[in-house]
């Protein structure tokens, strides 16, 4: 039975409006003032998740009461999965003449502002969701007209034929600016009556006494950098629901908590990840080939480092190309720098001519799931479920996850709606346990597709590396379509693959020329990233001593290289003896790489004040 519709949507919006932040317009500065410290271990982390407020005298007498709103379904994250789930729920409600209140919270200040992908999209799920998507004006302007794949050496390119039936075939797909598609989906959702609240980050999972999920709480605002309350402090809002859908994207910070509480990863392998870096360029119109899709593997990476590139020619009324580089986060050499590998790749003789005379207009980065079906956790638990890239539904060899993410949201909504309208339902918990979602997803084309390609990514862990994976794909996938009677395993979590610095060779990277390749700081400036400076850093450390005592001592501080935004740097202590870690949290592009690759697993990424982060425009 449906919940009664709580105070009107207007009242909910007033509550959110009361929590809105005053955002300062300031220039991005990658370096903050270097504070003096006389302590043996300088204090870095001030966030309440590490230093509880109930033990801090500065918080005595502060009103910690939160206002609560009731909804039927709460969705965390306005990406393709979350928006598709919201849309499908409202479609079903309209079809059955039912009232279903759907609330969706999104940490970005605008829908699509934190979305980053290649992106070459398979429109299958969009066609299911909106058969008339073309008439509705969905921003899919560039059908793929040409598919190219190659292996790079340092000086040449070896073309590789794309045989029919291989995952890389893109006939019928569209090159898109995914942020624009997400924004359009947001418009469709609002038109159907979904209540969308951008700029409000889900900071906490709420639970009923019986252990089921009760909903979420948005982040508190008005906290000083040292962790003390400001005069403007406001508690976040609680959103309660019968079902809470977690669509946070890759490596969501709430999903991490749910994995532990409900032991959701008990029967799956560790997730494996990659870091994807992307730029948008306007190029010479004579070099522009709208609809061309290019992918490469090989140089500048060695065969044991998984990764590759993409270069897509968009048809967006101007000669625009999207290019990027992906590095598997199971790499071993702590001296590897994904950002600088990307910049070096652009100088390859087969890439640089396309960019010469052009102008770079945008930059960003995001982690992506690469584990495949063997790394997908249990998807349901009392009161909630996981959809999209949060559990890891990316088809790795296709380099596509939008279609699977959208379909998972649609399948979830159909299962949720079935329970909401079942007046004879007898739930064992207050929060509904929608187990039918996982059962139905496993019967869908999503599961069949992911199962067929399950062995391609782990096949790259042989002595032949990436080339062994290509051989495996050619023999077993192309001939057997994933029907081989075995499932390969990953070697373990990505952070555990990093070798000590003493066992590795430092990598010498060429200096950027400012025309084709660029420095990190000017790149981050193009992401539009901004955070309120006077707030506790949202990159928290479980132990402030570990960065120097272990990461720097053993791995030569890999966080200052794997971060694609210059968040982490080791600076000298004022005494002149030793170093300390400085966290430039205002630079963070919310890619989650640090939380994934930190060899000590000491970094815990949590949400900053809502609205902070990158401001991507169609990335």
Image (spheres, rainbow, N blue to C red):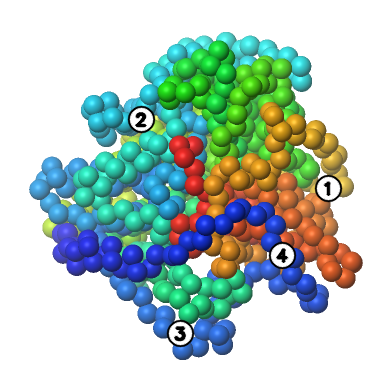
Name the one closer to the observer, 39 or 544: 39
Precedes in sequence: disc 1 or disc 2: 2
Are the residues at dot 4 and dot 2 in contact (C-beta closer than 8 Å)? no
Above or below — where is 564 with respect to 100?
above
Rounded to the nearest angstrom, the CA distance separating label 4 from label 3 is 30 Å
Determine crowd level at label 2: few under 14, some 14-19, many 20+ residues with C-alpha closer than 10 A: many
**Quarter of the image containing the N terminus?**
bottom left
Distance in Å between CA atoms under marks 2 and 3: 48 Å
Q: Secondary structure at mark 2?
A: loop
Identify the residue shown where x is 43% and y is 39%: 179
Where residue 362 appears, x then y in whole percent? 56, 37
Label 1, label 2: how far apart the Cα atoms are: 47 Å
Mark number displayed over residue 33: 4
Between the C-alphas of marks 1 and 3, the distance is: 47 Å
- For the residue pair 534 and 385, the one nearer the viewer reads as 534
In the picture, measured across the screen, residue 192 lies left or right of residue 519, that is: left
Q: Residue at x 64, y 41 (%)?
A: 523
The residue indicated by pointer 3 is 62
The earlier-in-sequence mark between 4 and 1 is 4
Q: Position of residue 222 (x, y in %)?
A: 48, 72
Mark toward the start of the polypeptide (2 vs 3):
3
Mark 3: which secondary structure? loop
Along the horizontal axis of the image, is 340 left or right of 266? right
């Amino acid at each position: 039975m449906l919940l009664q519709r709580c105070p009107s949507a207007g009242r909910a919006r007033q509550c959110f409006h009361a929590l809105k932040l005053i955002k300062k317009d300031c220039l991005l500065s990658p370096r903050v003032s270097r504070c003096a410290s006389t302590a043996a271990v300088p204090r870095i982390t001030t966030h309440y998740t590490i230093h509880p407020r109930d033990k801090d005298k500065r918080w005595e007498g502060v009103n910690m009461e939160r206002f609560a709103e009731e909804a039927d379904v709460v969705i965390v994250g306005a990406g393709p999965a979350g928006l598709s789930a919201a849309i499908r729920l409202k479609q079903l409600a309209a079809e059955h003449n039912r009232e279903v209140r759907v609330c969706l919270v999104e940490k970005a200040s605008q829908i699509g502002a934190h979305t980053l992908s290649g992106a070459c999209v398979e429109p299958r799920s969009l066609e299911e969701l909106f058969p008339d998507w073309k008439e509705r004006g969905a921003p899919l302007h560039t059908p793929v007209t040409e598919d190219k794949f190659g292996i790079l050496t340092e000086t040449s390119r070896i073309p590789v034929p794309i045989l029919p039936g291989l995952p890389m075939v893109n006939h019928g797909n569209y090159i898109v600016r995914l942020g624009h598609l997400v924004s359009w989906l947001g418009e469709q959702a609002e038109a159907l009556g979904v209540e969308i609240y951008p700029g409000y980050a889900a900071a906490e999972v709420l639970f009923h006494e019986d252990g089921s999920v009760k909903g979420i709480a948005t982040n508190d605002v008005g906290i000083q950098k040292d962790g003390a309350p400001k005069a403007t402090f406001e508690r976040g809002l609680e959103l309660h629901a019968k079902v809470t859908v977690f669509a946070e994207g890759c490596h969501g910070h709430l999903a991490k908590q749910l994995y532990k509480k409900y032991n959701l990863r008990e029967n799956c392998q560790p997730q494996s990840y990659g870091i994807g870096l992307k730029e948008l360029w306007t190029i010479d119109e004579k070099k522009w080939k709208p609809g061309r899709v290019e992918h490469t593997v090989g140089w500048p990476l060695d065969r044991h480092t998984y990764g590759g590139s993409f270069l897509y020619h968009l048809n967006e009324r101007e000669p625009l190309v999207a290019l990027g580089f992906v590095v598997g986060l199971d790499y071993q050499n702590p001296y590897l720098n994904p950002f600088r590998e990307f910049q070096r790749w652009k100088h390859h003789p087969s890439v640089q001519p396309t960019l010469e005379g052009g102008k770079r207009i945008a930059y960003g980065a995001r982690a992506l799931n690469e584990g495949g079906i063997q790394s997908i956790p249990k998807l349901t638990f009392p009161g909630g479920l996981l959809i999209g890239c949060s559990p890891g539904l990316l088809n790795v060899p296709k380099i596509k996850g939008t279609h699977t993410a959208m379909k998972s949201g649609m399948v979830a909504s159909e299962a949720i709606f079935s329970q909401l309208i079942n007046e004879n339902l007898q739930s064992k918990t207050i929060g509904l346990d929608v187990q039918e979602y996982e059962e139905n997803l496993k019967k869908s084309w999503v599961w069949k597709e992911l199962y067929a390609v399950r062995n391609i990514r782990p096949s790259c862990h042989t002595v032949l590396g990436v080339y062994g994976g290509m051989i495996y794909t050619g023999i077993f996938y192309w001939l057997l379509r994933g029907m081989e009677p075995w499932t390969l395993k990953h070697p373990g979590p990505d952070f555990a693959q990093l070798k000590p610095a003493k066992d590795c060779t430092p990598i010498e990277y060429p200096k950027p020329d400012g025309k084709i390749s660029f420095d990190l700081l000017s790149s981050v400036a193009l992401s539009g990233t901004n955070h309120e400076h006077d707030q506790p850093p949202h990159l928290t450390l479980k132990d402030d001593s570990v960065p120097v005592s272990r990461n720097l001592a053993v791995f030569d501080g890999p966080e200052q290289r794997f971060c694609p935004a210059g968040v982490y740097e080791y600076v000298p202590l004022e005494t002149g003896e030793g170093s300390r870690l400085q966290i430039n949290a205002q630079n963070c592009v919310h890619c989650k790489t640090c939380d994934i690759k930190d060899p000590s697993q000491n970094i815990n990424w949590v949400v900053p004040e809502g609205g902070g982060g990158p401001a991507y425009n169609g990335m």
